[in-house]
Amino acid sequence: MDLDANRSLIAAALERIPGGDRAALQTVYRLTSAKLFGVAIRILGERSEAEDVLQEVYVTVWRKAAAFDAARASPMTWLIAIARNRAIDRLRAGRQNRRMEPIDVAHEVADTAPAADSALENAQDHARLHGCLEGLVAHERAALRGAFFDGNTYDELAERMKVPLGTMKSWIRRAMIKLKSCLKQ
Amino acid sequence: MTDIDDHSSMSEDELLAAEYVLGVLAGADRAAAERLLQRDPKFAAMVAAWEQRLTPWAREIADVSPPPQVWEAIAAALPAPPRAGLWESLAFWRGLALAGALAAACLGAFLYLGALNRERPLVATIEGGGSRAFVATIDAKRGTVAVVPAAFSADPTRVPELWLIPADGKPRPLGLLRADRPVFITIPPEFAAQTVRDAVLAVSLEPPGGSPTGAPTGPVIGTGKLTSL
């Protein structure tokens, strides 16, 4: 599918939702639910919780679609942020299913190629981010991965990587500063 | 990329925004970031900028198709749609479907008593899982079937398809249905002889465009026997 066309289809449908257009929400769901379900499963580690979260996400989209501004944000970025936040809220509310196996930096898996996906339009943005992540020290990159993909907190990352909490905080903060500066270039 | 020894290039607020988007905060820290997000437009802009920077990473997560009941639950959680024109109003058609048997009975009686039509209409209430999904009325003279949705919720990935199952038990495709309005289908002439009393109508969920095989491939969500009024 033409990705630009896909992006404008999603944005146009989001703009019809505040008028109470259910078919527009259904269009958004059809075009984006597989990506958001993948994101929720990745963070929560299991399907049934992810199904509940997916339901909450689209009910939130129905209520908050008026806040989406196509001139300022990509629709997928906006939707994925809602899905990640809802999944993280769910993860923090329960204590189960945490990914807590140790992270071994020496055997850290290389960043994988983009999965075959239907809805994320910005291959260039991904390539740029990927390049900047490659510029980080391996332990910084591993810590960011644990947070972004597994939904780990500072405490959990410190435990998984066997470092003091203060060390983990400065790794992450330093990595974020480097990322911002690299992405600016 | 140069290494950075202090945090001077990012304010505490911006670091908090970055941590919030990354997802490392918990408890009081996450709640504080959420409060700031609601109240402080500058903080909200920082969060949006960090979402823009980090979200492309999600490209590495593979798509997973959710099961159809997720959409059904979402549709059920939405507020009732605003009143639309009568033709567009599903509530109207649902009401009509509930009154359908009575209305058809009156019509049938008229037709019968007036001897305008020797053939009495056949109706089928297509039910499954304890609820009435569609009501079908066959006009044998014209060779059409009118199908009105009742308690059927749309599924975004699959479409309802109507089947005729005569005495031989083999389903014949009649056409695609809609969740939001009635459809009128012309019965193929080769099936006309089987569209008789006690034949069964069934609805299955199929890929967009209908069953690719000519036989039901998805779950059957309801069936109903044709009865004459």
Image (cartoon, coloured by chain):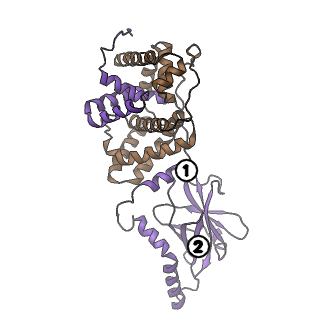
Chain colours: A brown, B purple
Q: Which residue is mark 1?
A: B68
> From the viewer's perspective, is A180 left or right of A84?
left
Residue B154 seen in the figure: yes
**Residue A66, relative to residue B62: is it above or below?**
below
**Residue A44, relative to residue B184: is it above or below?**
above
Distance between mark 1 and mark 2 Cα atoms: 26 Å
Camera-nearest label, 1 or 2: 1
- Which amino acid does the dot numbered 1 rest on? Pro
Chain letter of the residue beneath label 2 in the structure image: B
Q: Which residue is mark 2?
A: B124
Q: A5 and A45: which one is in front? A: A45
Instruction: Write the residue at 43% across / 46% down.
Output: A58
**Residue B174, relative to residue A91: is it above or below?**
below
- Secondary structure category for the residue under label 2: strand
Q: Position of residue B218 (x, y in %)?
A: 63, 54
Chain letter of the residue beneath label 1 in the structure image: B
- Secondary structure category for the residue under label 1: helix
Q: B43 and A25: which one is in front? A: B43
Q: Position of residue B106 (x, y in %)?
A: 49, 84
Decide: few, some or many residues near mark 1? Use Cα within 10 Å; few <14, some 14-19, many ≥20: few
Q: Position of residue B117 (x, y in %)?
A: 55, 85
- Which amino acid does the dot numbered 2 rest on? Ala
